[in-house]
Image (cartoon, rainbow, N blue to C red):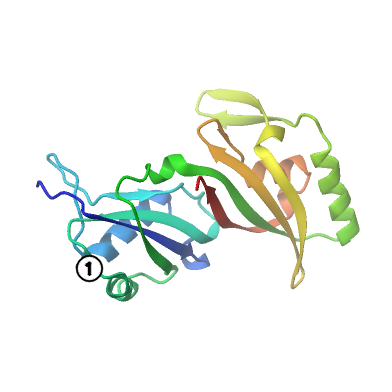
Amino acid sequence: MTNQPVQRLRLVFGKGAEVKYISHLDVMRAWERALRRAAVPLAYSQGFNPRPRLFFAAALAVGFTARAEMLDVLLEQRTDLHDFAARLKAQLPEGLWLKSVTEVPLVSPPLPGQVLAAEYEVLIETGDTAEEIKARLVGLLAMESIPRHRQRPGEKRAYDLRPLLQQLWFAGWRANLAAIGMRLQANPQGTGRPDEVMAALGMADAVRGTERMQLFCRS
């Protein structure tokens, strides 16, 4: 297959509670199926097993929901954005929804390499007051170093969470749950994890939900 891309579309999409326990690989497959069923002119890779040329900004952990994930799709024929969006929305499974479609230059750098940070909102069940929660957050931000460990098969690696924690704030109440917002570094030099932040706060057992609110990319 020798088709060459002539258009690059950037999709912003959400991932709801209905599909929060499926893996990133399954999310990729769901988008691939939806795009094929929508009969849009996808550009394919070459080789023995050609695949649609889709590029996700960043994998999302299993169990998390998301409001503004990003996906670049390369097409072999120019397509009207409104028509593209209408066809695709009709094919998406429950739990995935399309928020916007924009065209970006074909020569733009690969999307995964453009991600700098991610914002999350974590819901917790707690008897603490807002002021008590804020005091915990201020205390963690005041630390010069936050030593943590990451467990990998056959390895336990020590690292410092503090440089990966860019912002941390109390985001208010969602019914009877407290919401904690955080902005974490997310690039090849290091990626912060919201579960590690909650563990460092001593609130890991109180977590009732985590949502990635947005990704921050190079302009």
Specify the amino acid type for callout 1.
Answer: Arg
Indicate the secondary structure of the residue bearing disc 1: helix
Can you see residue 128?
Answer: no
Q: Is residue 49 above or below residue 146?
A: below
Asked if residue 213 can be seen in this view, the reply is yes
80 horizontally vs 200: left or right: left
Identity of the residue drawn at 80% across and 40% down = 141
Front-lying residue, 111 or 46: 111
Q: Tally the numbered discs.
A: 1
Q: Position of residue 79 (x, y in %)?
A: 23, 67
* Residue 138 in which image quadrant: top right
Identify the residue position indicated by label 1 in the image.
Answer: 37
Left or right of 71 in this view: 87? left
Q: Residue at x 50, y 48 (%)?
A: 219
Is residue 135 placed above or below 113 in the rendered structure?
below
Picture quadrant where residue 98 is located = bottom left
Quadrant for residue 150, please give it. top right
Residue name at image x 15 percent, y 43 percent:
49
Which one is in front, 91 or 69? 69
Mark 1 is surrounded, within 10 Å at the Cα level, by few (under 14), some (14 to 19) or many (20 or more) other residues, namely some
Q: Position of residue 188 (x, y in %)?
A: 50, 33
Q: Position of residue 24 (x, y in %)?
A: 42, 50
**Is 175 positioned to the left or the right of 142 in the image?**
left
User: Residue 207: where, in percent of width, then height?
Assistant: 69, 55
